[in-house]
Image (spheres, rainbow, N blue to C red):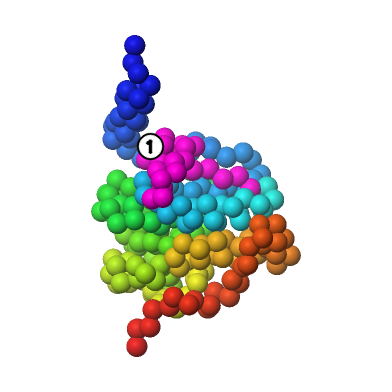
């Protein structure tokens, strides 16, 4: 009889094998219920915990919202250690209203992961709005989707991220930037502020303030308030 740990290892290997055997396709499968605001959040090993959980805490308090996690394996570990269970794997793509992309040390390797970048490139076309937090913008930069777009990123990793794509209009001073289809935030906690901004865009100031009060959070509601700005002059 297999021990539990052996079984989990075999299951994980099987999942990884299936991803390699069946590359991502433009599937029309439905992951969400009808008449909901559909948020699909990408997770990967060594994502930054607050990059993900700060924004989904805020966005999850909006009315009629549904949040699903997508990742390369069933279980994904954050940089700080806690694991999450994905709702679906990266063997298909889904229509969604908001695609959320956290950052973290895991992005340092993933920018060179051709399979993930290919999946992301297609998923962007199925997403009405894209919201990156921290170095999640590095993954977007590698898809060339940010070319010609104003964007920002974690200021502690600013030099590295901006070196990945010269055609992006990187903003050295910005808590977050909203340009067309893309909402990009600065590092870690800035994503929570940007999430409340997006709640305001969707449902108005009163709703955003309701969520701020409900979560006992002090919202930095000015996108130009960036104490960690990079001074390029």
Relative to 113, residue 34 above or below? above
Q: x and y percent of residue 178 in the render?
A: 52, 69
Decide: few, some or many residues near mark 1? Use Cα within 10 Å; few <14, some 14-19, many ≥20. many
Can residue 143 be seen here? The reply is: no
Which residue is depicted at the point 41% across and 37% down?
A: 75
- Queried whether the magenta region covers residue 50, the answer comes back as no
Q: x and y percent of residue 168 in the render?
A: 36, 71
Res 105 → quadrant: bottom left
Which residue is depicted at the point 63% across and 67% down?
A: 218
- The answer to whether residue 148 is left or right of residue 219 is left
Magenta-colored span: 65-93
Quarter of the figure that contains the N terminus? top left
Q: x and y percent of residue 84 in the render?
A: 47, 41
Relative to 108, residue 220 above or below? below
Q: Which residue is mark 1?
A: 73
Relative to 127, residue 198 above or below? below
Res 73 → quadrant: top left
Quarter of the figure that contains the C terminus? bottom left
The single residue placed furthest to the bottom in the displayed view is 233
Q: Secondary structure under badge 1?
A: loop
- The answer to whether residue 51 is left or right of residue 17 is right
Say which of 229 and 87 sits in front: 229
Q: x and y percent of residue 56 in the render?
A: 56, 52
């Amino acid at each position: 009889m297999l021990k539990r740990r052996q079984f989990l290892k075999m299951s994980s290997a099987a999942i990884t094998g299936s991803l390699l055997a069946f590359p991502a396709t433009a599937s029309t499968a439905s992951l969400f219920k009808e008449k909901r605001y559909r948020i699909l959040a990408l997770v990967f090993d060594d994502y930054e915990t607050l990059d993900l959980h700060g924004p989904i805490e805020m966005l999850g308090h909006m009315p009629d919202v549904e949040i699903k996690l997508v990742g390369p394996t069933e279980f994904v570990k954050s940089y700080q250690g806690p694991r999450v269970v994905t709702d679906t794997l990266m063997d298909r793509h889904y229509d969604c209203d908001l695609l959320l992309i956290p950052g973290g040390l895991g992005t340092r390797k993933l920018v060179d992961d051709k399979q993930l970048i290919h999946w992301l490139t297609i998923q962007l076309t199925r997403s009405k709005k894209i919201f990156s937090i921290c170095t999640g913008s590095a993954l977007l930069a590698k898809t060339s989707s940010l070319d010609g777009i104003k964007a920002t990123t974690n200021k502690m990793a600013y030099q590295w991220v901006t070196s990945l794509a010269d055609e992006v209009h990187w903003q050295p001073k910005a808590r977050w930037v909203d340009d067309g289809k893309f909402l990009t935030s600065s590092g870690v906690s800035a994503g929570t502020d940007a999430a409340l901004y997006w709640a305001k865009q969707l449902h108005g100031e009163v709703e955003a303030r309701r969520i701020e009060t409900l979560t006992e959070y002090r919202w930095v509601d000015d996108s130009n308030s960036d104490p960690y700005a990079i001074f390029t002059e």
